[in-house]
Amino acid sequence: MLPHENESSKRFDQCDNIQDNLYDRRIPLHSDLAYQHGILFEAKYIRSMEINRPTLLIEIVAAMWRFRYEFKERNIKKKPVDIVVSVEGVKVVLKQEKNEQKEQSLGESKRLVMFHPICK
């Protein structure tokens, strides 16, 4: 084996992207079956608010400040919610408190905060 042949194979190994597939964003983290059932995320919900579509970065920052100011001014409590992403759409559902779980579970329609369907 010639020395230059060994160098070329070494360079190919360094550029081989197959080994780095774990961090590739184009490869989905979850299987299609997981999306059928829904992927669950835990979050804290403040509230929903209509905001005009911003065209400039300044408008985005102003909308964020306005939202934060109203949140602090009205002393709104954050509610724990589950965000479920599935093939049907994105659902935000209130979590049940421990004492509610013991007594009686609310129907999902009463706990549903918002639902945004995915257009196919």
Image (tube, rainbow, N blue to C red):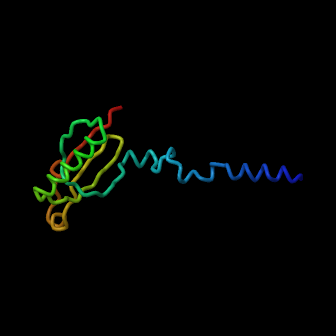
Nearer to the camera, 32 or 82: 82
Q: Is residue 116 left or right of residue 17?
A: left
Nearer to the camera, 116 or 25: 25
Q: Is residue 16 left or right of residue 36?
A: right
Image position, residue 82 (x, y; %)? 27, 55
Residue at the spot 47% in from the left edge and 50% down from the top edge: 29
Residue at the spot 21% in from the left edge and 55% down from the top edge: 94
Numbered marks: total:
0
Direction top: furthest residue: 120
Direction front: furthest residue: 58
Image position, residue 73 (x, y; %)? 11, 56
Image position, residue 32 (x, y; %)? 44, 44
The C terminus: image quadrant:
top left
Residue at the spot 69% in from the left edge and 52% down from the top edge: 14
Image position, residue 89 (x, y; %)? 31, 41
Nearer to the camera, 37 or 74: 74
Q: Is residue 27 left or right of residue 17?
A: left
Direction right: furthest residue: 1
Direction left: furthest residue: 74
Nearer to the camera, 110 or 77: 77
**Quadrant position of residue 50:** top left
